[in-house]
Amino acid sequence: MHEEILGQYNWWLVVLSIAVSILSSYTALLLVRRMMQTEGAVRWKWLLIGSLTFGVGIWSMHFVAMLAYKMDMVVTYKAWGVTLSVIAAIFSSFLAFYLISRKERRWFHHILGSVLIGLSIVSMHYIGMDAMEMGMRIEYDPLWVALSIGIALAASFAALQLFTISANVKREEADYTNLKWWGSSLGMGAAISGMHYTGMYSASFHPMEEEKISSAVPVIDPTLLGLCIAFGVMATIGFLIKLIAFDTKMESTTDRLHLANQMYKSIVESANDAVITSDASGRVLSWNRAAERIFGHRKEEMYGKSLRKLTPGPYEEGDLSKMVQVIGRTVELEGLHKAGHTFPVELSLAKIDDHGKVFYIGIIRDITERKEAHARIQELVFKDDLTQLPNRRALYEYLFESMQKEKSDASSAVMFLDLDRFKHVNDVYGHRIGDLLLSETAERMRGCLDEEDLLVRQSGDEFVVVLPEPSEGEARRKAESIMKAMALPFLIDDREIYMSVSIGISLFPKDGHDSELILKHADTAMYQAKQSGGNQYVFFTNQISAMISRKVQLEAGLRKAVERGEIEVHYQPQIKVSTGDVIGFEALVRWRHPHLGMISPAEFIPIAEETKLIIPLGELVLREACVQFQKWVDAGYKVERIAVNLSSVQFRQPSFLKVVERVMEETGMAPRHLEFELTESIVQDSETAIPVMHELKRRGFTLSLDDFGTGYSSLSYLKDFPLDTLKIDKSFIQTINENYKERAVVDAIISIAAKLDLSVIAEGVETLEQLEYLQGVGCEEYQGYYFSPPLSSEKVWTLLKKCALSQ
């Protein structure tokens, strides 16, 4: 039956029919997706186009598939049947797409949609079959018909599931090569093609009794007709795909523009700066929330109003030349608030030319806080926070500006002031009291100056006064006035504090032609005032500069003198008065400078103590003296001791005893041969000195008190300290034969020492008369130029040999 009537398939048309069904499904998917992304009338437009595309696609697939059969008869179609099949396909597709595109869709919507799509395919097929006119009647196999309907329903359901997932892909993720889209399209195409070819297989064709099978050939070749229909439908589908792509692109562009516009509005409205748009005449077109906050005007009050209400200057009505001048730049202006007060603003202006129409966009920032912060920073930068005086930075700027004025008669004086012993106030009373004292000091100094004078806190307890165009007498008068004011007691927290001040004065242009040099010279003069005892003023001189320069030179050289071997130890013999024998030596340090020659200890020892260089220097002298003494002893010479001077800086070092112990171990010298000469500055701090002195005595060392009778010498020293020897200062010995008072002092010292069982040695003996007097009053030992000046170690060897030979 099938074999009797049906010819062979035209496979080109079969492939085309399947391709038409797939492409129709794909295009319908795109159209429905566009529908789901739109609202209102546009949504219905895309729904209708999608339904038409899918319905026509189903019909064209059916028509092409029918033409794929080679039949030896002419086949025509009934117009009403074809129309009805097309309407059925379109209507069913419309309902199905509508259901699956609903936002509130449920699972039964998918089932109902699948049934409608399946029925549209089935109804279109069997109505189309019924519309065929030929000399045959068609009979259907019920089982195959049922199978075709089942295939249509199942494939439609699966396809719609994928269809729904694919249609909901986010726009930014959409891709025309998406496998889900093509999977959905293939599923729908399978539903259409599978149902059609299964339905065709269920049909059998039988000749009608009253008619005879025609052997005429069709007027138009079926293959050609099928190709025309297939390519026509695919061309239409291609056009629709292009249309969808173009519409999507346009909508995407529109959406981006809309999004950009919304973002622009959001940014403008949320900006902290006023963003204002105006036309060419300066009339306001837009006004954001920040503009309302900054200027106080609401949007409704400013639309169409002139920018003259905001600030004068570049917005004057009828004159835009000033406005044009600030385009592309940031300028500072004065803003006018609705309340009437003005405030500083910063304006950035841009110009937009839209086909001859000019607009201006201005960004205005309220910089009141920034200005206030800048003023505060300037205050912090140029003002001292404690005394509220100008600080060092302000001083340098003032001096630089004032000294740049090239006036032949211009002059000024700089006074450098430093409080004497201010550190003691901080140490005793604490820094809070010290700060209050500095504030009160600033007030007193300010009261001694004229309004045009500049008072500056340099740093710490240092102040600087600049007197514009004064005479030397005027500078002297104001220095004395400040010193008198500072001499009055300060009453701080019920405490009376007495202070004094040292002042150095330099004159411009006499003492220098730039600010740095003038300050340096004033500081140098102040240092000289302090060195001279403080509480005085000193004018800078070249002699002071030379002295300070030499001190700086010596300090720099002293730091390297030990490394370079410039330090020498000389030894002055100590003689027993009764026999004339050498019983010991005093080690004395000498510095042989490579350029300045021999430097006096009186000049470099104070520098060494001030810079703490006395610590390594003292250790060097101690070690060298011990090494040399041990060599004399090892050589067989009878020398009882060697005396080494101690500085108060050395004595107060926590490591002093360890240093002494290490030197003794390294040199092998017995402690009983080493005598430490202590100065008055050491023993004055009895709480610290006594324990260390007792420890030295315990270890076997001997102790002598140097220069006894000078300074603030006290008899309590003799009572409280474990001393062995008193050294009478040479100042008493030098005039002992001329001044009875000097003799009385020497007699008393020797008498007291004898009663306390202390040895006495006189320093600075230079004449026979001096020696004879000392012998007469019972002085046991002496040293001085009468016997020998300090000798180098080589000359000491010669002296010891000579003494040994004479014995």
Image: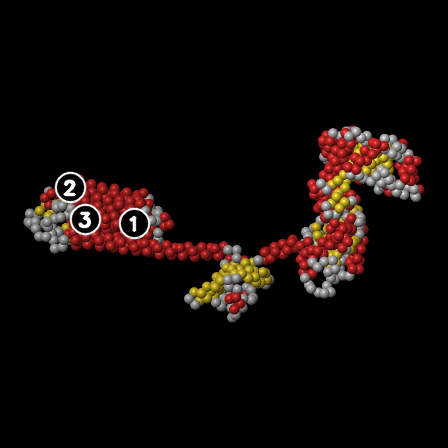
Q: Residue at x 20, y 53 (%)?
A: 229
Mark carried by residue 12: 3
Residue beneath disc 1: 29
Q: Which circle's residue, 2 or 1, is located before the other in the chain? A: 1
Task: Looking at the picture, tell me which residue is in the foreground, 15 or 528.
Answer: 528
User: In this rendering, which labeled residue sits more in front, label 3 or label 2?
Assistant: 3
Type of amino acid at the residue the image marks with label 3: Trp
Type of amino acid at the residue the image marks with label 1: Leu
Is label 3 in contact with label 2 (beta carbons under 8 Å)?
A: no
Is 549 situated above or below 715? below
**Left/right of residue 781 with respect to residue 692 in the rendered view:** right
Quarter location, residue 156:
top left
Type of amino acid at the residue the image marks with label 2: Asp
Q: Which circle's residue, 3 or 2, is located before the other in the chain? A: 3
Q: In 3D space, how far apart are the residues under numbered discs 1 and 3 (Cα atoms)?
A: 26 Å
- What's the coloring here? secondary structure
Mark carried by residue 141: 2
